[in-house]
């Protein structure tokens, strides 16, 4: 997993609440056996009308998504954060997330940031009023900042994050990497176990 320390990129607004995982990536695209190739299917159904906000030129290449409460609710599917990552997003900001989506995101390297509703509303409005605006998310300092731009005011806020998931993201540790950090202890345990608990024929 790629380490996450700091991201500066375009902020894209998705002004909707209760976006579920089937809306993030519809079920018909979950049959692939690889972990790649899901980016083109992100928000697939909404993109069919030709006027989906994330397809507007100003938001193309965005790496930060700001959206409404309860993002990622619904059924568990790692494909949801996979599709967001493959579409270029590294961060999703919302007032709240579906619990399983939030956990899956951390484990896949996508940073879910929870902010108060008023702060999220400010970000959505700024992104709509200033298309192409850049934002910085610094995981080391747990700060979000928007620089002054064209006479517009700068903006900043701190966010909180579970210390374990923060350490994993900063170091790029997925579950395999976490396990391998204890490879010596595991080998020692298995060697002792094989003599104390011989296999039954």
Image (cartoon, rainbow, N blue to C red):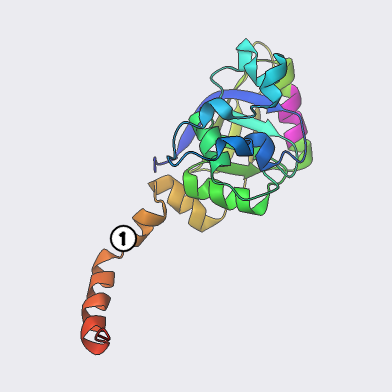
- Of all residues, the one furthest to the front in this rendering is 201
Task: Identify the image quadrant of residue 55.
Answer: top right
Residue 123 forms part of the magenta stretch: yes
Residue placed under numbered mark 1 in the picture: 181
Say which quadrant the C terminus sits in. bottom left
Q: What element carries label 1?
A: loop
The spot of residue 51 in percent (x, y) is 72, 14
Q: Is the magenta stretch mostly helix, strand or loop?
A: helix
Judge whether residue 95 can be spotted in this image. Answer: yes
Relative side of 195 to 78, left or right: left
- Report the label total: 1
- Mark 1 crowd level (few <14, some 14–19, many ≥20, 10 Å Cα): few
Q: Identify which residue is drawn at 65% across, 37% down.
A: 93
Residue 38 forms part of the magenta stretch: no
Say which quadrant the N terminus sits in. top left
* Vertical side of 102 occupied by 143: above or below: above
* Vertical side of 159 occupied by 85: above or below: above
Q: What stretch is highlighted in magenta?
A: 120-125
* Vertical side of 9 occupied by 130: above or below: above
The spot of residue 155 in percent (x, y) is 66, 28
The spot of residue 53 in percent (x, y) is 70, 19
Judge whether residue 149 can be spotted in this image. Answer: no
The spot of residue 134 in percent (x, y) is 58, 21
């Amino acid at each position: 997993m790629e380490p996450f320390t700091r991201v500066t990129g375009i902020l894209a607004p998705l002004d909707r609440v209760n976006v579920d995982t089937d809306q993030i990536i519809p079920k018909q695209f979950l049959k692939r056996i690889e972990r790649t190739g899901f980016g083109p299917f992100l928000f697939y159904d909404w993109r069919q009308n030709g006027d989906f906000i994330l397809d507007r030129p100003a938001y193309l290449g965005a790496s930060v998504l700001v959206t409404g409460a309860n993002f990622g609710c619904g059924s568990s599917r790692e494909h949801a954060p996979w599709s967001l990552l493959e579409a270029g997003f590294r961060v999703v900001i919302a007032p709240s997330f579906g619990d399983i989506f939030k956990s899956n995101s951390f484990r896949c390297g996508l940073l879910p940031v929870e902010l108060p509703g008023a702060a999220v509303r400010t970000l959505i409005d700024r992104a709509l009023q200033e298309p192409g605006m850049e934002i910085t998310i610094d995981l080391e300092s747990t700060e979000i900042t928007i620089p002054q731009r064209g006479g517009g005011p700068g903006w900043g806020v701190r966010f909180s994050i579970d210390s374990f998931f923060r350490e994993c993201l900063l170091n790029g540790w997925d579950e395999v990497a976490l396990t391998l950090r204890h490879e010596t202890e595991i080998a020692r345990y298995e060697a002792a176990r094989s003599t104390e608990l011989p296999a039954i024929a």
